[in-house]
Image (cartoon, rainbow, N blue to C red):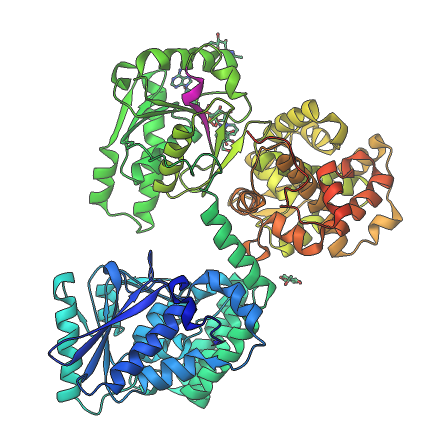
Amino acid sequence: MKTTRSRQIGEREMARGKTEMEVGSDGVAVITIINPPVNSLSIDVLFSLKESYEQALRRIDVKAIVVTGQNGKFSGGFDITAFDGIRGRMTVQPEIDVSVDIITDIFEGAKKPSVAAIDGLSLGGGLEIAMACHGRVCTSSAQFGLPELQLGLIPGFGGTQRLPRLVGLTKALEMMLLSKAIKGDEALTVGLVDAVVSPQELLKTARQWALDIVEVRRPWVKTLYRNDKIESLSDAREILKFARMQTKKQAANLSHPLVCIDVIEEGIVSGPRAGLQKEAKSFQKLLFSDTCKSLVNVFFAQRSSSKVPRVTDLGLMPRNIKKVAILGGGLMGSGIATALLLSRYTVILKEVNERFLQSGIGRVKANLHNRVKKGKMTKEKFDITISRLIGVLDYESFKDVDMVIEAVIENISLKQKIFADLERYCSPNCILASNTSTIDLSLIGEKTNSMDRIIGAHFFSPAHIMPLLEIVRTQKTSPQVIVDLLDVGKKIRKTPIVVGSCTGFAVNRMFFPYPQAALLLVDHGLDVYEIDHIVTKFGMPMGPFRLADLVGFGVAMATGMQYLENFPERCYKSLLIPILMDDKRAGEASSKGFYIYDNKRKPTPDPEIKKFVEKARTMAGTTSDPKLIKLTEKDIIEMVFFPVVNEACRVLDEGIAVKTSDLDIASIMGMGFPPYRGGIMFWAESLGTNYIYSRLVEWSKTYGDFFKPCSYLEQRAKRGISLSSSTIQVKSHL
Ligand SMILES: NC(=O)c1ccc[n+]([C@@H]2O[C@H](COP(=O)([O-])OP(=O)(O)OC[C@H]3O[C@@H](n4cnc5c(N)ncnc54)[C@H](O)[C@@H]3O)[C@@H](O)[C@H]2O)c1
Ligand SMILES: *[C@@H]1O[C@H](CO)[C@@H](O)[C@H](O)[C@H]1NC(C)=O
Ligand SMILES: *[C@@H]1O[C@H](CO)[C@@H](O)[C@H](O)[C@H]1NC(C)=O
Ligand SMILES: CC(=O)N[C@H]1CO[C@H](CO)[C@@H](O)[C@@H]1O
């Protein structure tokens, strides 16, 4: 990675992180990376590391070097917040290639040996520095990985060259292409480290190793030139060929994994120095790619989703939640119970009768069994986990629960009664959460005096697998309760977004126009399967029609009705699904929807669908529109997704969501929008507000108000400002 140093010495106190060096009487200089919380490698840290090395190399009382990180963490890798800075400074001279000039020539090429003492994280650039050392000692809980591909990049500090030389090609490819981390003991087995010791012994052992290298093992081996682990050229070619094939299958729209394979190959074919050079060049290019920018956006969006203005900035600490009660052991309830149990919560599951209770518990067991089958859980762990589940039929044991999550059938008077009961049986501090998808939370809490602790916890089905949690607050929900639920969300490994209450909340609300746009296009002459094909190619896990089959026509109609009730002026009402329902099609569950399903649930297009489409067109009075039939793939994608962007703007305007980045996360984790496009709003922004606005205006003239841009979008388009800009907005958020 080429970079320049912009800060002057006088600005030191502003520096992001540093290193410190301490020379012992044994002649070992211990250089410690200091940049909390994960000792990331900012530009300042890298240059300070270089200075410390140079000093150690100059001093005659120093015989050997140990590199380590402060507070039990080696280094979490390159500082991602510095990417923008590097992009901006690319043209400034002089350039220094960190990977070649510093890590390879100064650190690895030094006349004094260095040993990395690794505890905690050693990821990305952190691991790459450790690999350039002449020895590595770690603890068994240390974590090693090169996750750069998750950000649309490749390892940039020689990782593509050194990792294969330490652990062999197959293991190195697995760690890079799948961003798979390994722990200390495995690192020892595969040859990534030389010894595993206790945290107390770590520094002592590393010093000893460093001195041993000086005294006993001179001349020492540089990782970059090791050949004992790397496969023969012909074997390597076979392995790389297979990896390319797999990659093309699994990540059709991503080019950087293939670049990574090319760079590794260059090192094997033309030697590691050439490999380093190609790595540096490719890294620079990828840094400017849309994929990298998008994935970095997702990285930050995910981290900021748990930062909520005027909630998480009040200095509130999450309360300790240990015991959670769940009402209803249906599909949702059992999924939520599974997620909580997996994160060591004690779970009380309440049902209406013994039979339902047993089937609820059965579902939880089945979820956990699946993990055992997949090798993700041992039988012993299963027994311990399921022992924390307590099934009940009454509220007896609710006195000391910290949180209740209600997931019973959607019935207002039932839910009102339940919340009134909860108020009586639970402690006054207990959080009362509902997984309701449609009923207004204020209505649910109407018969209580507990609105400040009533909150929505909207999971996505299946709850133990889907990563998103919509936390729904009302005007009365207390910040403390939001902070508590954010903490639970994090502990059960969900990405939470905090939203206001409205029909569909943020995710389903902004995506309601998505199937409608697809149906509109079909009514006007496009083919069902072509739309699904194009949308899938764009990167969605499935097209809108395949999704409708999966959700089921019953559910699709019911939710469609809600939007029609709430937003009649901008709904497109196609008759196609009701017509299909008349033919006894209900979607995948009935083996027949837009597709036909075999007994393995494999979908096949149905030639008969034409007949129903014709009928729907006739009834709607639409005919095949010659203009539409000639649409390009790009047009079709835009006609399907711009209405989503438009609705997302309304969601922002109404204060349902507080940041565009939350909607990026919502689109990716709730709907499967491709992360390498950065999320729905990031993608929209990349096309330009004005472009989206003018296209919507154009379509609304032909196809009506379904496409009519909202005022939030219009105002920003006309002023040429970003969708996230709140300069116009004066409406108060929730
Ligand atoms: N699962 C989904 O994908 C999905 C989709 C749309 C909506 N929802 C919503 O999720 C909620 C639950 O959905 P589900 O699919 O799990 O429903 P479900 O019918 O499978 O399960 C509901 C369970 O709650 C139990 N129950 C009813 N009253 C109870 C009470 N007073 N105390 C304890 N248990 C009680 C029922 O016996 C039933 O087993 C509903 O509000 C529904 O609207 C879920
Ligand atoms: C995504 O991949 C498909 C092939 O699967 C290709 O046709 C399409 O152009 C790709 N899109 C982008 C933006 O790379
Ligand atoms: C809703 O719940 C109430 C109270 O339990 C019950 O009396 C009513 O029959 C239920 N309504 C429906 C439609 O299930
Ligand atoms: C009761 C409840 O919350 N229902 C919601 C729970 O989560 C599922 C999964 O999306 C939603 O579909 C339900 O609306």
- Camera sees residue 174: no
Asked where in the image residue 58 lies, by quadrant, the reply is: bottom left
**Residue at image coords 16%, 69%:** 203
- Of 356 and 697, nearer the camera is 697
Asked where in the image residue 644 lies, by quadrant, the reply is: top right
Asked where in the image residue 98 lies, by quadrant, the reply is: bottom left
In the image, 60: left or right of 624?
Answer: left
Q: Is residue 217 magenta?
A: no
- Camera sees residue 3: yes
Q: Is residue 367 above or below residue 236?
A: above
- Of 385 and 195, nearer the camera is 195
- Of 439 and 121, nearer the camera is 121
From the top left corner, tell me how far across and down residue 534 is, in percent.
68, 53
From the top left corner, tell me how far across and down residue 195 is, in percent.
17, 72
From the top left corner, tell me how far across and down residue 732 is, in percent.
60, 30
Looking at the image, which residue sits at the far front?
Answer: 10
Q: Which stretch is magenta?
A: 450-457
In what quadrant of the picture does the C terminus appear?
top right
In the image, 416: left or right of 625?
Answer: left
**Residue at image coords 49%, 28%:** 473
Exactly how many numbered labels are in the figure? 0
From the top left corner, tell me how far across and down residue 667 is, in percent.
57, 44
**Residue at image coords 76%, 50%:** 690
